[in-house]
Image (cartoon, rainbow, N blue to C red):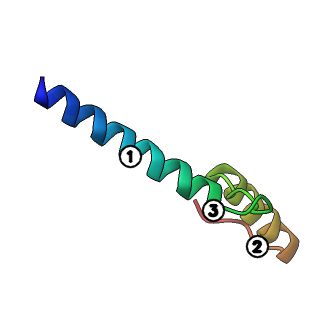
Amino acid sequence: MIRLVLAGLFAYTAYRVAVRIIDEVPGNVAPLDMPADERRRLRRQSAAMGVEPKR
């Protein structure tokens, strides 16, 4: 029974910490680019420079 209470307290504490961290993040943060987008961008950049990308 004590283990169950401790596990519940740990889960609740982790939840509260996560909520506090998420609330501190400003709303105007741009999401990170996905790796496929980065590869596509490098291909376009290489093509614009007249260089074939190495594979």
Secondary structure beneath dot 2 equals loop
Q: CA distance from mark 3 to mark 2?
A: 44 Å
Q: Earlier in the sequence, mark 2 or mark 1?
A: 1
How crowded pointer 1 is (Cα within 10 Å; few <14, some 14-19, many 20+) is rated as few
Instruction: Single out the residue that lies furthest toward the right.
Output: 48
Q: Judge from the rendering whether residue 12 lies leftward or rightward of residue 48; answer left or right.
A: left
Up-down relation of residue 7 to residue 49 (above or below): above
User: What's the residue at 63%, 62% (across, down)?
Assistant: 24
Foreground: disc 3 or disc 2: 3
Up-down relation of residue 45 to residue 7 (above or below): below
How crowded pointer 3 is (Cα within 10 Å; few <14, some 14-19, many 20+) is rated as few
User: What's the residue at 21%, 30% (across, down)?
Assistant: 5
Q: Position of residue 34 (x, y in %)?
A: 65, 52
Do the residues under discs 3 and 2 have CB atoms within 8 angstroms?
A: no
Q: Earlier in the sequence, mark 3 or mark 2?
A: 3
Q: Which residue is mark 3?
A: 24
Instruction: Single out the residue that lies furthest toward the left.
Output: 2
Up-down relation of residue 32 to residue 46 (above or below): above
User: What's the residue at 67%, 58% (across, down)?
Assistant: 32
User: On the rendered image, what quadrant is the N terminus found in?
Assistant: top left
User: What's the residue at 77%, 62% (across, down)?
Assistant: 41
Q: Amino acid at mark 2?
A: Val
User: On the rendered image, what quadrant is the C terminus found in?
Assistant: bottom right
Figure disc tally: 3
Q: Which residue is mark 1?
A: 14
Q: Which residue is mark 2?
A: 51
Q: Position of residue 42 (x, y in %)?
A: 73, 65
How crowded pointer 2 is (Cα within 10 Å; few <14, some 14-19, many 20+) is rated as few
On the image, which quarter does residue 39 sit in? bottom right
Camera-side residue of 53 and 35: 35
